[in-house]
Amino acid sequence: MGCPDCLMLCFIRYFFLANNLHNGDLGPTYNHGRSRSGAEDHSEPPRPPPPRPEDYYSTTRQFYEDTLPQKSKHLKPDPRFITFQKEGSVGIRLTGGNEVGIFVTAVQPGSPAFTQGLQPGDKILKVNDMDMKGVTREEAVLFLLSLQDQIHLIVQHRRDQYEQIMNNQRGDSFHIKTHFDYEQPNKGEMSFCKGDVFHVMDTLHNGVVGSWQVFRIGRNNQEVQKGIIPNKARAEELATAQFNATKKEMNASESKGGFFRRRKHNHRRSKSLSKENWDDVVFGDSISKFPAYEKVVLSHTGFVRPVVLFGPISDIAREKLTKDFPDKFLSPQLENNTTDGSKKISGIIRLSAIRDIMDRGKHALLDVTPNAVDRLNYAQFYPIVIMLRADNKQVIKELRTGLPKTAHKSSKKLLEQCQKLEKVWSHVFTSSLTLNGGDAWYRKLRELIDKHQSSPTWVSETKTVDFLSDLYLLPMSYPFCDPYVISSDTDYARKPNDFFGYI
């Protein structure tokens, strides 16, 4: 093919030739201005002037520019290297966050950063070789505050993106799940309970370190309430205080009742927990291994989730599911050898046994304590936890009618247990199902399990460690078991707050 200029020139020549033919002139396209008689002929229409170079070069240039890739039209400015000596403060204010990047929004006049040419609209790519991608605004501020002496920045001026961020008020964006109760908040802050999920929108509310602006996430994973909560550092301090108070209370209970003691001298373990102390295991508050705030994402687990049932007829439900649907449900159990050589079901469950069932594509149907649910979530098994609740003991008595004597339980005690669980451990429930008598609850239970298995859930952004495979979980019912299978817990390190105007 010819060049665009040649094609355009041929088109122009063709246009003028066609125009002359239309006027009946078969001769040359030029005109001498006189007739054969020598007189000037004014009847002939004037010829158009010859084409100028710009007539077709401008068209060709436009054609060429239209074919250029969009990226070549909007080239980003080259990154700049800026270095300066820190003199007290850094002398800048920041905006943005982990979702959009960190931007300079103001530079203090006369500061070293101002002298070296840092300006609003600059996107900070690196600080002293630390990549700023995915860094929250609070983390960026605290990192710059921690630096001493020389500061090295790699920045890129992105005014258009900066203005969009300011207009749309975008910056930080991530989700957290809480692992402590905040029942007495400071003025202007929201209270919350364990298991609540928040969408964090700004980690530097009002430009001050200490508070996060969030949206509370409701039952249907929708944003339902906007407010302020403590930042990560303050949350860790609050969770530590709660942790120490719980641990102190548990130690006092152990000292009073001889709870989980080893026998002296021969280091033999006690045979079992007393029935009086078993309620402390079932209903006692957990000492969580989780951080105060756990970063989570809404996602499908990619595996068949275990199922934990609580409530006055949970034993009936487990038996019916394993009997009626053996291809979908299986109950893992450990067997202990007795003195006479026979085997007795202890009810203790090992994490590795649960994983084996999950790998076979079945729901591991579990009878475990609420504390164990916390540990299952920490191990990232994400069980479907359903509370089969009853409003009165008559419903419980009706549903348990006809069971063998070995399965007989007091309706009154079962109702009290149900009420205690709802009061202390409702944060671990995935769903609750109210019992109204009849057999409708069984169909609804299966539908709930199927619904939650096919729905996304809040899962941790980080992977768990492998040593948890040897963890043992205790059953809800009173067992003859070794109490020392309960694992110990560790404390957390906490850091103080900081505040800033210009950092």
Image (cartoon, rainbow, N blue to C red):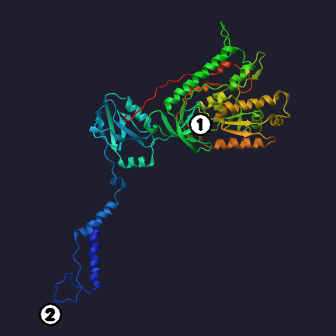
Q: Hey, which residue is sitting farthest bottom in the picture?
A: 37
Q: Is residue 435 left or right of residue 466?
A: right
Left or right: 410, with 382 as reference point: right
Name the spot of residue 201 as percent of width and height, x first: 49, 41
Q: Secondary structure at mark 1?
A: loop
Whole-percent x and y of residue 315? 76, 32
The reply to whether residue 2 is in sight is: no
Q: State which quadrant residue 334 falls in.
A: top right
Expressed as whole percent of the image width and height from the top left, the position of residue 260 reads 67, 16
| Residue, disc 1 | 196
Q: Residue at 46% x, 26% y: name it.
A: 496
Q: Nearer the viewer, residue 215 or 52?
A: 215
* Quadrant of residue 351 within the rendered picture: top right
Q: Report helix, strand or loop for mark 2.
A: loop
Q: CA distance from mark 1 to mark 2?
A: 105 Å
Figure check: 259 above or below 215: above
Amino acid carrying label 2: it is: Ser
Q: Is residue 386 above or below residue 335?
A: below
